[in-house]
Amino acid sequence: MKSPVRVAITGAAGQISYSLLFRIAAGEMLGPDQPVILQMLEITPALGALKGVAMELDDCAFPLLAGMVCTDDANVAFKDADYALLVGARPRGPGMERKDLLEANAAIFSAQGKAINDNASKDIKVLVVGNPANTNALIAQRNAPDIDPRQFTAMTRLDHNRAMTQLAQKTDKTINDVKNLVIWGNHSSTQYPDIHHTTVDGTDAMSLIDQAWYENDFIPTVQQRGAAIIDARGASSAASAANAAIFHMRDWALGSAEGDWVSMGVYSDGSYGIEKGLIYSFPCVCKDGDWSIVQGVELNEFSTGKMKATEEELQQERDAVSHLLP
Ligand SMILES: NC(=O)c1ccc[n+]([C@@H]2O[C@H](COP(=O)([O-])OP(=O)(O)OC[C@H]3O[C@@H](n4cnc5c(N)ncnc54)[C@H](O)[C@@H]3O)[C@@H](O)[C@H]2O)c1
Ligand SMILES: O=C(O)C[C@H](O)C(=O)O
């Protein structure tokens, strides 16, 4: 058995975490030979509910669960953490846009960035799930000056998974047939799901669908899927969000599938002309515990226009929280 690693999860008594924690403890994120210590953070009024979650984790008798910490102190939750999943934030309700959450949630991520900087392992891998995820990741990253900015990422894997399924269903194939799809930009309704380089069972995806379906059906469906779930369920996506978080972290830690791409919100190095320093979703591959942006993807005018629009939204979000960016 390997020695245990420390996984910090914020918002641990919330609905996403209720799907997430049990799968992490079962080994689905870091592998069946990797014991974990779960360091769970909540706000003080939710500590009672968090205790109930911890009791259920105990009752699962997971062989890989090597310990648990339940706390309302971020310094305790991030102490020596090797991984952090920042889920805790207010979710969007019906009729709200993600940017409505910006002010409400931004303060959480500056405080948590500082706590990560002061307490966590310097090699920590951070995934931000709480919305607006890209800008929250930027805030946390900028408040953690002693940690490599590449270690702060935002979740667009749910969008990636949604897009794969839409395309598989349209072409009467399975998601196993879909390769090299990309979500560019922000985890928001400006995101750009790009299938110009995607293959379905080895065939160029664009040759299997028509441009009108792509522009008027596929792209808006993927962009608006979060809102559609909220309308249908009366609550934002939870099990699918937890699943995407597991996939994102698993691939980053253990490597992504050979010959395929994953979408990750990562620190822009200026690739594809995207402003350096934004947390922007790119096509990535993961190997040896690290991610890299896939280079050389050819872009037509349609794609560059959409990529620019979502970049501009991220620049506006950043400017709106400039007071929290040291
Ligand atoms: N990136 C994505 O694809 C994606 C997908 C779905 C949901 N989300 C976002 O994830 C977040 C969580 O969603 P949820 O449905 O689990 O919400 P939820 O309200 O069920 O749970 C959030 C939890 O966070 C806790 N919390 C609030 N402030 C905190 C703080 N400062 N420290 C620690 N915990 C804190 C709350 O007490 C609550 O228990 C929301 O922002 C939602 O919009 C993102
Ligand atoms: O859309 C939301 O607010 C929830 C979440 O980000 C989602 O994409 O399901």
Image (spheres, helix red, strand yellow):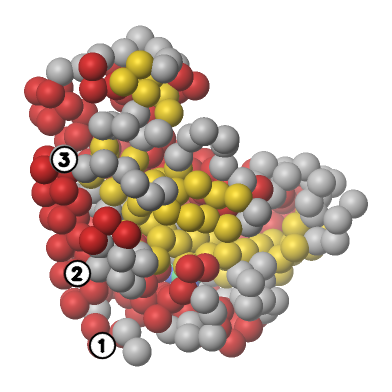
Mark found first going from the N terminus, 2 or 1? 2
Helix, strand or loop at mark 3? loop
Residue 106 position (above or below residue 325): above
User: Residue 285: x percent and y percent?
Assistant: 50, 47
Mark found first going from the N terminus, 1 or 3? 3
Q: Nearer the viewer, residue 51 or 257?
A: 257
Residue type indicated by callout 2: Gln
Q: For residue 51, which quarter of the picture? A: bottom right
On residue 300, the disc is: 3
Spot the residue most to the right.
Answer: 1
Residue 144 visible to an observer of this rendering: yes
Distance Cα–Cα, label 2 vs label 1: 14 Å
Helix, strand or loop at mark 1? helix
Residue at (63% x, 72% y) in the render: 123
Front disc: 3 or 2: 3
User: Residue 321: x percent and y percent?
Assistant: 24, 79
Q: Decide: few, some or many residues near mark 1? Use Cα within 10 Å; few <14, some 14-19, many ≥20.
A: few
